[in-house]
Image (cartoon, rainbow, N blue to C red):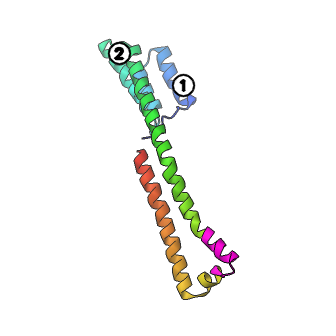
Amino acid sequence: MSAVAVPDPDLLRPVLAAARDGGDVPAALANAAPAQGGEGLRQLAACWQVSITAGAGLAALSDRVAATLRTAQLHSQDVAAQLAGPRTTARMLAVLPLLGLLMAATLNMHPLHFLLGSLPGLACLATGITLNACGLWWTHRMSTQAER
């Protein structure tokens, strides 16, 4: 789920002009809504249109839109908070091989000489980097899908 975006004030100038001059406010609202996070403005445009055509009260409709957006924002924040732990764990696990290299170097085991100086070492290094990158990519993919 995407976060609710605050529209650019310059994009709202046509909406203000339409409201002031008796223009098509729902169309101006729909045009001002950004592609990502503009659900609130599109819903407000629909409410405005219903208010014009059916005579429904705009205040009650806009209150419902606001409540829906608040609920969506709280849900998005909850998901982000729940994903913070797994994301941090994945980053920490990605750094652990570097810590292993540092520990081996402090024990005078020459890990870089093995990794960069021999064919089995290069194979281990390439495999490790590939698996580490795949793990980071997979974790990012899963958390991105969970946020949607």
In the image, 60 versus 72, the foreground residue is: 72
Residue 56 figure quarter:
top left
In the image, 20 versus 148, the foreground residue is: 148
Residue numbers of the magenta segment: 99-111
Tell me if I can see residue 38 in this picture: no
Q: Is 2 located above or below residue 50 in the figure?
A: below
Earlier-in-chain disc, 1 versus 2: 1
- Pointer 1 and pointer 2: residues touching (CB < 8 Å)? no
- Chief secondary structure of the magenta portion: helix
The local secondary structure at tag 1 comes to helix
Q: Position of residue 26 (x, y in %)?
A: 40, 23
Location of the N terminus by quadrant is top left
- Density class for disc 2 (Cα within 10 Å; few <14, some 14-19, many ≥20) is some
Residue plotted at (47% across, 19% down): 18
The local secondary structure at tag 2 comes to helix
What's the residue type where badge 1 is placed?
A: Arg
Q: Is 122 located above or below residue 85 in the figure?
A: below
In the image, 96 versus 62, the foreground residue is: 96
Q: Nearer the viewer, mark 1 or mark 2?
A: 2
Label drawn at residue 51 = 2
Q: Residue furthest bottom?
A: 118
Q: Position of residue 122 (x, y in %)?
A: 55, 82
Location of the C terminus by quadrant is top left
The answer to if 30 sits in the magenta stretch is no
| Residue at image mark 1 | 13
Mark 1 and mark 2: span between their CA atoms? Answer: 21 Å
Q: Residue furthest left?
A: 54
Residue 45 figure quarter:
top left
Q: Position of residue 32 (x, y in %)?
A: 47, 30
Q: Residue furthest front?
A: 107
